[in-house]
Amino acid sequence: MSMIPLLPMVKVNEVLAARLPQFLGPWSGKKTTEGQSNPTFILKGKNKSLVLRRKPDGNLLKSAHMVEREYVVMKSLYDTQVPVPKVFYLSEDVTEIGNVYFVMDYIDGFTFNQPELPKLTREQRARVYDEMNFGLASLHKIDPEGVGLVNYGAPGNYFQRQLSVWSRQFSNSFTEKIIEMEILKEWLSNNIPAQILPNRLVHGDWRIDNLIFSKKDFSLQAVLDWELSTLGDPRSDLAMQLMQWSMPIGKDGRGLSGVNRRRLGIPEDSEYVDLYSKRVGLIKPPELEFAMAISFFRMAAILQGVKRRAIDGNASNPAKGIAMGKYVKVLARAALNYLKI
């Protein structure tokens, strides 16, 4: 059996035969082009398709690439209104295939990398965005205690913790001084809001390319990439999505900047927030200034980490990692423009 990058297929076949004998090999594997953080592979056998997600090689930042957390949260959410793939097992035995990994069901559906959804009709776009909104509201309505995740996050002010975490991650991935990031960090440090809403499970990277939609009716079929999930302020997920939309259109920015949303059937930010607020039972839309600013900062820190791994030779897609690194300054500048600084 052949060796594909980052995945020893001989060993994979051995462990799948032992762990999941109901699914028949031999197995072939193909690495997806997505999954900058954790390498992801589609495995095809005789009577089943699976997905294997593993940690990358090399020296990893503390609390990053937590495939263990992804496994735990998807297992906990499987019987809720939030659709997730069925997870079969987590292996923390690095002797099996060379690193920590988990295996989950393969969901056959539509995935979209461009939020303007250029190949869909106006009605189909409206449907996708409504499902995305419903999915986020459904997630934030879940009581963590009810799904066994009451201890899934640390206590204290969520945004304070986020600023601390991502400041540290950015410093640990440092490559050059970026003055815009320093100005943004100072503003964030001086404007941390009190946490008003109760802790909820937050996804951490809620955007269209982490969702799978039905090929029949565009209903939400699966929410993926839970690596950054934790308990915290639900405003962070909402702001993360709005932040993404503020970026340029195209495969790099994956935003909606300059798009005529009404013509395309895509809701404006305020419409999306209003609908979300009604669905989660808020009397009025939440205040999002800080949440938006730290969303820019956090995404910049994430991309800085991708760039650092690419430079160090540990990125899932090195060329893409280097290219994405140029957006660190762009994101920081966008945050300052948003804050009118």
Image (cartoon, helix red, strand yellow):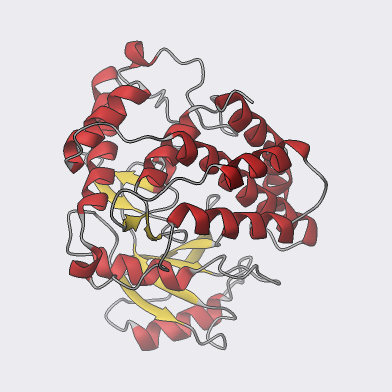
Q: Position of residue 104 (x, y in %)?
A: 35, 68
Residue 159, above or below 49: above
Q: Left or right: 69 with respect to 110?
A: right
- Foreground of the two, 154 or 47: 154
Residue 47 seen in the figure:
no
Residue at figure coordinates x 64%, y 49% from the top left:
301
Q: Left or right: 274 with respect to 93?
A: left
Residue at figure coordinates x 33%, y 46% from the top left:
212
- Foreground of the two, 221 or 11: 221
Q: Position of residue 67 (x, y in %)?
A: 47, 69
Residue 37, above or below 153: above
- Foreground of the two, 3 or 334: 334
Outermost residue on the right side: it is 176
Residue at figure coordinates x 25%, y 49% from the top left:
221
Residue 151 seen in the figure:
yes
Residue at figure coordinates x 36%, y 46% from the top left:
211
Residue 72, above or below 38: below
Q: Position of residue 87 (x, y in %)?
A: 32, 70
- Foreground of the two, 111 or 37: 37
Q: Left or right: 67 with respect to 94?
A: left
Q: Quadrant of the N terminus?
A: bottom right
Q: Quadrant of the C terminus?
A: top right
Number of marks drawn: 0
Quadrant assignment, res 50:
bottom left
Q: Position of residue 247 (x, y in %)?
A: 55, 28
